[in-house]
Image (spheres, helix red, strand yellow):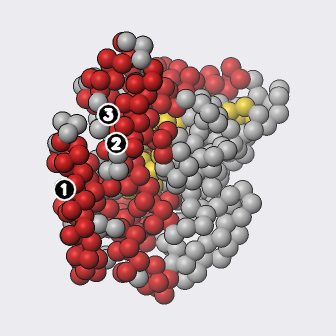
Amino acid sequence: MEHIISADVVEKDNAARRADLERDYQSLGERLDRRDIAIDAIRDKVEKFAVAIPSWGVGTGGTRFARFPGAGEPRDIFDKIEDCAVIQQLTQATPTVSLHIPWDKADPNRLKQAASRFGLGFDAMNSNTFSDARDQKLSYKFGSLSHADASTRRQAVEHNLECIEIGRTLGSKALTVWIGDGSNFPGQVNFAKAFERYLDAMKEVYAGLPDDWKLFTEHKMYEPAFYSTVVQDWGTNYMIVQELGDKAFCLVDLGHHAPNVNIEMIVSRLIQFKKLGGFHFNDSKYGDDDLDAGSIDPYRLFLVFNELVDAELSGAKGFDPAYMLDQSHNVTDPIESLMLSAVEVQRAYAQALLVDRKALAGFQDANDALMATQTLKAAYRTDVEPILAMARLKTGGAIDPVAAYRAAGYRAKVAAERPAVASGGGGIV
Ligand SMILES: [Mn+2]
């Protein structure tokens, strides 16, 4: 297997940090022992935890107003795969890439070859009927899968079926569908008719799904439609997956809810009714800001993982969510942001594994609200960084991924090889 960052650089950086890490790990291990937690068992679980990288994440994102490209931006999907390989090499937390069609369209066999050079696999396929591709016959300006015109709906269905076909060659096992369909004016769209058309179209997509595949439908409250959105919330999403069948699941993008919505409770509900498909992790302050996972409200990320770990440990039937990052990087190096975000997701997982669930259940039954919430806080307050760093070290990654990345000079190297991208154009997805 090829490595993009020189192993010498990673080893040199690790060597400088190794002794301190071993002391920190030892000390944390002793403290966890007092709580009857075996640190190695937590580290083993963290090692196995993986989150997929979205191919579009390695390019600089943007807003509706502008995009300010960075140096050495990937020119095509093959450059993107190399950037994803760097993230995986240093974090050992991101072994798969999630492709977006048509942005990443290329010969599937070449794609497969490019990824396997670095030991990467492919996560869920993502279709795009929220923008018009070049040479596309019918426009999605007024919708796609819910469009009033049958030929436009057909074109959108065919596109999703094509994504499945490409994914089959790549070894993907899921299709994620997010649509921007909706309306900007009261009266513009008949809510019921639009939803009916969407369901009919999605049934055709579902019918084209191989037996061992899953279909993820992603809800989002608003944008680009600012008055009404066809798949706007988890309630509608739940109705959709119920209508479609056993292979259909809800996908929760953390940024796609109204501010202050209790997302962890939504997660619990979907787990309880066996319809949680997976996540798009990011963070937000005001809306769908697509900020780095864990950068604004790490406690919320922890509370989401508290529900996930609760399901994992209780052996919830059919519980096997897909984890993916989905965020936009406007002012940072996307590779650095994605590495840190993957680590943040792992951190929330590790912290949630530390919750004393027996004690928590006791406090809940005794209506001891204060001690119940303190039980969660005790886990959240634990600095699990030595566990995460040790998991990376053990699997061949970097103790400090950003430091190793900077020491390797990767960005400067690719900036010399990849021509600068002209600025302009929006970039948020
Ligand atoms: Mn998303």
Say whether residue 43 is visible. no
Earlier in the chain: of badge 1 and badge 2, it is 1
Judging by the rendered image, the residue that carries numbered circle 2 is: 351
* Amino acid tagged 3: Val
Residue drawn at the location 63% of the way across and 25% of the way down: 195
Q: Are marks 2 and 3 in contact (CB under 8 Å)?
A: yes
* Amino acid tagged 1: Gln
Earlier in the chain: of badge 1 and badge 3, it is 1
* Amino acid tagged 2: Gln
Q: Residue furthest bottom?
A: 416
Task: Describe the element under mark 3 as helix, strand or loop.
Answer: loop
x%, y% of residue 300?
Answer: 49, 39
Residue drawn at the location 48% of the way across and 45% of the way down: 298
Judging by the rendered image, the residue that carries numbered circle 3 is: 355
Say whether residue 235 is visible. yes
Judging by the rendered image, the residue that carries numbered circle 1 is: 26
